[in-house]
Amino acid sequence: MNDGFTESVARFRAEVSAAVTAARRASAEARETSAAFRRDTQRLAAKGTGAPPESQRAQQTPPDDEDFSQDQILLHGG
């Protein structure tokens, strides 16, 4: 009776391991696809606006430059 349980546990572990491996592969493929899509989108956007892609803009910006994305200062009255 113990042999049947041991075999069942071994089979379960093998199935879980195979499922985890398949999930990791699928996740890696999805990340690659997503990264390629982002690169293509940035290239197309840069073509449309004439602006350099995001990766090139990041290289042109000095590291000590602070980016304030608002044109005016917002004050909380109270």
Image (cartoon, rainbow, N blue to C red):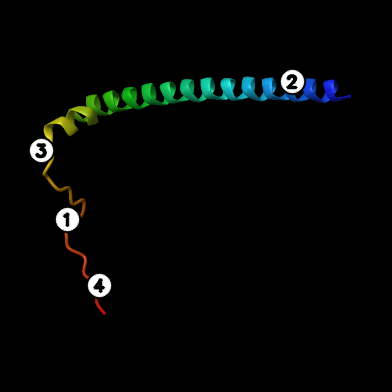
Q: Could you tell which of marks 3 and 2 lies nearer the N-terminus? A: 2
Q: Which mark is residue 11?
A: 2
Q: Could you tell which of marks 2 and 1 lies nearer the N-terminus? A: 2
**Image quarter hosting the C terminus:** bottom left
Residue count near mark 4 (Cα–Cα under 10 Å), binned few <14, some 14–19, many ≥20: few
Asked if residue 10 lies left or right of residue 35, the reply is right
Q: Which mark is residue 76?
A: 4
The CA distance from mark 3 to mark 1 is 20 Å
Asked if disc 4 and disc 3 are in contact, CB closer than 8 Å, the reply is no
Which x, y percent locates residue 20?
A: 59, 25
Which mark lies nearer to you, 1 or 4? 4
Q: Residue furthest bottom?
A: 78
Which mark lies nearer to you, 3 or 1? 3
The CA distance from mark 3 to mark 2 is 56 Å
Residue at left offset 22%, top offset 28%: 55
Q: Could you tell which of marks 4 and 3 lies nearer the N-terminus? A: 3
Instruction: Tell me the element at label 3.
Output: loop
Q: Could you tell which of marks 3 and 1 lies nearer the N-terminus? A: 3
Toward which corner of the image does residue 16 lie, by quadrant? top right
